[in-house]
Amino acid sequence: MKKIREIRKALGMTQKELGEHLGVSAIYIYMLETGRKKPSKLFLKALECIYQQKMKGGDKIE
């Protein structure tokens, strides 16, 4: 999904970094970005939370 890649890049993260924040592997992020896997609702919600926190000016993402 190109959208996941766009969000990751907007966050300034590598696939590995995003995966670490979400508790998944960089390979899983790659598979999502290339359309080989579909993200779960839980994954999308977690990604949304990270993105919203960053956009609100949170430099440190937990």
Image (spheres, rainbow, N blue to C red):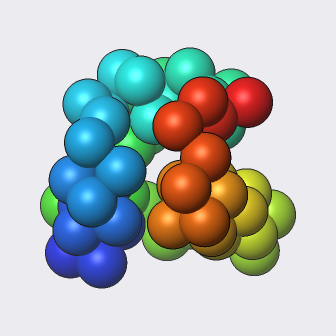
- From this view, report whether residue 37 is shown above or below residue 15: below
Number of numbered discs visible in the structure rendering: 0
Q: At x 60% / y 65%, what residue is drawn?
A: 56
Residue 58 rendering spot, x and y as whole percentages: 61, 46
> Left or right of 55: which side holds 14?
left
Residue 47 in view in this figure? no
- Please identify the residue farthest to the right as the structure is shown: 42
Compared to 3, does 24 lie above or below? above
In the picture, the quarter occupied by the N terminus is bottom left
Where does the image place residue 7, in percent across and percent down from the top left?
34, 65
| Of the pair 19 and 55, the residue shown nearer to us | 55
The residue lying toward the viewer, choosing from 2 and 49, is 49
Which residue is rendered at x = 31% and y = 36% of the image?
13
> Residue placed at 80% from the left, 63% from the top?
42
Q: Is residue 11 above or below residue 35?
A: above
Residue 39, quarter of the rendered image: bottom right
Q: Quadrant of residue 54?
A: bottom right
Determine whether, in the image, residue 61 is placed left or right of residue 26: right
In this view, the residue farthest toward the front is 57
- Measured as percent of width and height from the top left, residue 12 is found at 26, 42
Seen at 35% across and 50% down, the residue is 11
Asked where in the image residue 57 lies, by quadrant, the reply is bottom right
Can you give x and y, in whole percent of width and height, for residue 62 in the image? 73, 30
Q: On the picture, is 23 further left or further right than 26? A: right
Q: Is residue 18 visible?
A: yes
